[in-house]
Image: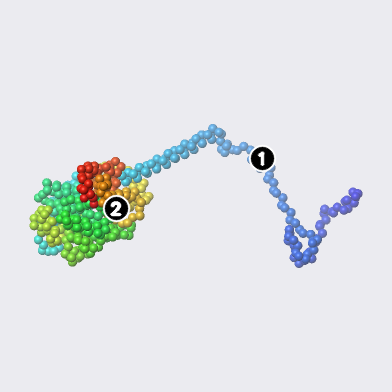
Amino acid sequence: MTENEAATARPNENDSPPEVVSTDSHEAAPNQDPPSGAPSNIPTTETEPEPTQQPPADLFQSLQQPLPRWMNPPPKLRSRFNRYLHKMFSRLCQFTIIIIVMCILLTIYKYKVDIDQSDFSHLEFDWERVNPASYLTPMDNPFKYNILLDGHSHTTYSDGRMKPEQLLKWAIANGYNAIIVSDHNTIDGALEAQKIAKEKYNDSIVVIPGMEYRIHMQFIGIQSNPFGPFNKPYPTNEDLKGMIDKVHEMGGLVTVNHIPWSNKTERKHQVPTLPDHPTREELYEMGVDGFEIINGDVFDFETYLFAEKYQTLKISGSDVHHPSEAAYAWTLLNAPNITFEGIMSGLRGKETTFLFDATGTRPRYYPADNKEYLALLPITALANAVTSFYDDYRGMVSFQGGFCHERNSTHPDLKYHYIAHTSIDVIEERVSTSPETSDTYLGLLYAMEDLAIWIPNKHPSKVCGGPVCNPFYNLDGKKSIVSKRFVAAIDAIGKMTGEEVSSSSP
């Protein structure tokens, strides 16, 4: 083909392409097949791809330029900065560890260091002796009496703050000439008070030894511990009846203290303070001799009506724990003589009434602040602040070997309690069924009993209620399981014959 022919055949660039008119009423979409029946030779319009935008050339040039000095410090400065970060992180870790250790130590301090806010070492009740008969009238007037009795009190042998002699001074100053000392689950404080009264205050006051047992049932006039080697922390009604019968065999009387307190709602738990507490009718059927009608400044009118109906013994009790507490009620009775035997005879006669003053006696003693407590007060405040992020309330102590309400807690103190009493139960069963192993098991039984009974001169802690809650209290060095009583029991058992050992088993 010649050059002129090629130019003639090439279309003109300025000419527009021929317009194609579709013969169908619908245009075919791009990149799709034409409708059926349309001619196959109809051309389709295709969309051309958009060209990719290229970055400007000056961008590459700007990236290749060196960074500013503040963004690219010299190696020496970078090294110093890295060392600074490393030291700062190290010190932050040290500070965190110190804070954790301090929190642990302060928490241990809160629960292990128990210092009284007040100083109870020097108590003086130096006011003129109160004479309640000068301003009060007996409930059953006229009533002849020669005894003004406090029927319920505590010493440092359980959860009281006064030693036995201090308690006697408090009672004398408040117009009592007889007092029932009834510590929780121990008679040691009462026997010591009785001995001191005979030696120093024989003309002023007579002590009736007693004990407040488990559900705050009071044993009056006993001279020894009625517990056997095995003592259940949560006695059933049958167990209680057995204890009542045993106290009666020992020549004592049994009363039940502060029923309103036992049945009131326990804080935060919506249950009674003492769950499953026997009713007055059940207690009467068990054989109790009477009830505490007045506890502190609370007059139990329902129990008073019940006692009047069934002619049971009626007593009042200060339930004193602290020297600053007042006296509110005095149990009146006419005893043959002002001695232990005479007062017990009067109580057995069940002819009692009361002097009652809801205001309480005016003179009171307030102990001085404990200097040791004040010295440690900043640490105590810091420990309270550290431990304020959780609730450690464990419920009211019932002195039943645990807390007054049913618990689902796995607190270690409670675990020790259950382990101890379960062990006692197992040992008791082994001794009764296998006399040949009595030597070993009976020794362990005495040791477990020694741990399960209240440890003298210790009062309940803020968390678990002290040794009553946790029989292994102060196990780490201060109170070893190999106690003197355990050694004495083993020595005694070694001297016994097999027949004697068998008869000593529970």
Label drawn at residue 61: 1
Seen at 90% across and 51% down, the residue is: 5
In the rendering, at what x and y percent does residue 65 appear?
63, 38
In the rendering, at what x and y percent does residue 328 appear?
18, 57
Front in this rendered view, residue 449 or 218: 449
The residue type indicated by label 1 comes to Gln
The tally of labels here is 2
The answer to whether 109 is drawn above or below residue 212 in the figure is above
SS class of the residue under badge 1? helix
How packed mark 1 is, by other alpha carbons closer than 10 Å (few <14, some 14-19, many 20 or more), is: few
Front in this rendered view, residue 258 or 286: 286
Whether residue 48 is visible here, answered yes or no, is yes
Q: Which residue is under mark 2?
A: 402
Seen at 28% across and 60% down, the residue is: 276
Outermost residue toward the left in this view: 336
Front in this rendered view, residue 318 or 432: 432
